[in-house]
């Protein structure tokens, strides 16, 4: 591992200034991802600034009845938080389906959103990877791509985003609060992460030195009828082949409103807006769920090794919505 400088700042403004002036500086919270990448030689920052005690580590109700989650809240604490479990259960389910208990005790809300892809070529410094070394090529396109993207990919990158929590938060209309060199901003989580395009090295729209301080969830009543379902190769400590987070409002057998997001299929949590539009105002039925899933997946472009993700995603969407329709009646 390359030697680096470690610092701990006492205030957000000072930390942001420190990182902004250090092109190869990075924030450190739980360290469950960045430390691994440093060991592999994928990331080699000159300086780490510890923000674990700098951002809030509590969950509180907002003035409009929503919830504000401090960026330093651990995944374990957030999954166990009573308000999250009752009003936003998809988030709790997503967190408990990820990593291990030990990692969840360390990983933070802000860090979870910023974790990087687990593409094997990104993590292997002996292979070409546009995300790690722009312009070098994408080894996964013609290589081992069983776990890669079927939606929103480009000729430069077919990696997928690894976070379970981010998928659930995308389905539940979360906002990410940040502080950066230009002050505070509030970003819809759907806009936080990027599709690869011609710049796959950029995972998010955040500027260098911009720090996530909180995540806000809206007071939408039917989000209490939400669910996260994850399909993976083994029962625990595995990333999603396909996952679905959804929330649904059903009245008299008709879908009044619905939210759907997919994981394991794209470079970012994939908001299934086409499926949502197809379902609003329609009767609850498996046939309608299946038709909506087909509409969402009609633009999928599988690689040589991951065509299975299309029927898998369709079936997981149908199963998740079917469960919610029963629970929401």
Image (cartoon, rainbow, N blue to C red):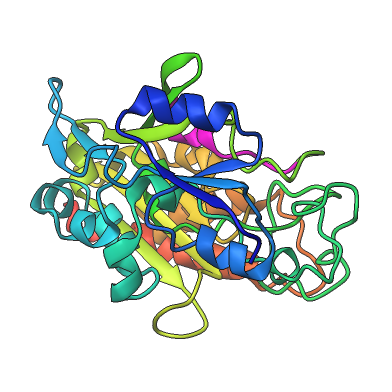
> Would residue 87 be found to the left or right of residue 311 on screen?
left
Left or right: where does residue 157 sit relative to residue 234?
A: right
Spot the residue most to the top.
182
Q: Is residue 132 left or right of residue 107?
A: right
Residue 154 appears in the figure? yes
Where residue 207 appears, as percent x and y from the top left, is: 58, 28
Could you say where residue 201 lies in the image, as x and y percent from the top left? 72, 45
**Label total for image:** 0
Considering depth in this image, is 199 or 254 the residue closer to the camera? Answer: 199
- The residue lying furthest to the bottom in this view is 234
Say whether residue 68 is left or right of residue 266. Answer: left
Q: Is residue 124 above or below residue 285?
A: below
Q: Residue at x 32, y 47 (%)?
A: 52
User: Where is the N terminus found, in terms of image quarters?
Assistant: bottom right
Say above or below: 291 vs 249. Answer: below
Quarter of image, res 78:
bottom left
Q: Residue at x 66, y 34 (%)?
A: 23
Q: Which residues are magenta?
A: 187-196
Q: Which residue reaches farthest left?
A: 82
Residue 206 appears in the figure: no
Provide residue 80's location: percent of width, then percent of height.
Answer: 15, 60
**Who's the residue at 69% across and 65% down the image?**
41
Query: Which x, y percent locates residue 134?
Result: 84, 47
Instruction: Judge whether residue 161 is colored magenta.
Output: no
């Amino acid at each position: 591992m390359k030697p680096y400088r470690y610092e701990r700042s006492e205030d957000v403004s000072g930390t942001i200034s420190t990182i902004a002036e250090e092109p190869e500086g990075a924030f450190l919270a739980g360290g469950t991802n960045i430390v691994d990448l440093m060991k592999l030689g994928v990331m080699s920052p000159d300086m780490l600034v510890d923000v674990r005690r700098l951002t809030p580590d509590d969950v509180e109700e907002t003035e409009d009845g929503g919830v504000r989650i401090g960026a330093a809240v651990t995944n374990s604490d957030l999954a166990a938080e009573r308000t999250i479990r009752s009003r936003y259960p998809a988030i709790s389910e997503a967190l408990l389906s990820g990593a291990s208990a030990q990692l969840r005790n360390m990983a933070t809300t802000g860090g979870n959103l910023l974790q990087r892809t687990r593409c094997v070529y990104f993590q292997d410094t002996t292979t070409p990877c546009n995300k790690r070394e722009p312009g070098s090529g994408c080894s996964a396109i013609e290589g081992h791509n069983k776990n890669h993207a079927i939606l929103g990919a480009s000729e430069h990158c077919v990696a997928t985003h690894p976070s379970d929590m981010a998928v659930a938060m995308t389905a539940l209309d979360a906002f990410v609060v940040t502080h950066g060199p230009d002050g505070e901003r509030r970003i819809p989580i759907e806009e936080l992460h990027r599709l690869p395009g011609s710049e796959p090295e950029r995972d998010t729209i955040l500027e260098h030195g911009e720090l996530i301080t909180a995540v806000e969830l809206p007071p939408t009543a039917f989000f209490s009828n939400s669910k996260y379902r994850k399909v993976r190769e083994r029962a625990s400590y595995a990333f999603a082949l396909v996952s679905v987070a959804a929330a649904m409002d059903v009245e008299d057998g008709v879908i009044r409103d619905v939210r759907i997001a997919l994981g394991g299929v794209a470079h970012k949590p994939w908001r299934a807006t086409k499926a949502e539009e197809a379902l609003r105002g329609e009767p609850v039925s498996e046939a309608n769920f299946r038709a909506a899933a087909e509409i969402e997946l009609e633009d999928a472009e599988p690689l040589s090794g991951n065509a299975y993700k299309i029927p898998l995603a369709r079936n997981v969407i149908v199963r998740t919505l079917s469960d919610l329709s029963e629970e929401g009646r």
